[in-house]
Image (spheres, helix red, strand yellow):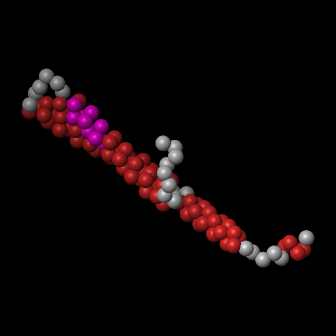
Amino acid sequence: MAAERNVPPNASDGRMVQAVGERERRALVQRQGTTASVLSGFAFFGRIGWAIVVPTLLGAAGGQWLDEHYPARHSWTLTLLIGGLLLGCVHIWRWLQREHRSIRDEQGGGRDESH
């Protein structure tokens, strides 16, 4: 038994050491990423909220101006409010897709198997 403990490492041990080292590095990076504060979470949701609210309110204001100056059978306010809401949602969707892609690339590249 004592002789088995003193066996010199072979080439496969080097690969194992590298694999364990890489796994530990990823774990450290992940732990550092989870130390985000509550305020950064609020900032994230605030950014999403404002990115939807601003185009929606601008659409409503523009629609109200159009209703006052160029009356029509349909409501410009409602039309542009919905348009602004859709624009904000599309903007957030694209932004989240970019963020997801950059996070996936930082974690090792591969394809997202969940989709």
Q: Quadrant of residue 12?
A: bottom right
Residue 18 colored in magenta in the image? no
**Which of 56/16 is in front?**
16
Residue at coordinates 11% horizontally, 25% vertically from top-left? Answer: 72
Magenta portion: prevailing SS class: helix
Looking at this rendering, what residue extends furthest in the right direction?
A: 1
Looking at this rendering, what residue extends furthest in the left direction?
A: 69
Q: Quadrant of residue 71?
A: top left
Does 28 sit left or right of 97 as displayed? right
Does 91 sit left or right of 99 as displayed? left
Residue at coordinates 23% horizontally, 41% vertically from top-left? Answer: 58
How far across and down, in percent of the image, does residue 99 sit?
A: 42, 53
Residue 80 colored in magenta in the image? yes
Does 71 sit left or right of 31 as displayed? left
Query: Which quarter of the figure is the N terminus placed in?
Result: bottom right
Looking at this rendering, what residue extends furthest in the front direction?
A: 11
Is residue 57 among what the camera can see? Answer: no
How far across and down, in percent of the image, does residue 37 sit?
A: 51, 57
Looking at this rendering, what residue extends furthest in the top direction?
A: 73
Is residue 19 among what the camera can see? Answer: yes
Instruction: Identify whether 5 is placed above or below 48.
Output: below
Residue at coordinates 22% horizontally, 38% vertically from top-left? Answer: 59
**Which of 35/91 is in front?**
91
How far across and down, in percent of the image, does residue 79 sit?
A: 22, 31
Does 84 sit left or right of 99 as displayed? left
Residue at coordinates 50% horizontally, 55% vertically from top-left? Answer: 110
How far across and down, in percent of the image, does residue 100 sit?
A: 44, 51
First to last magenta residue range: 79-88
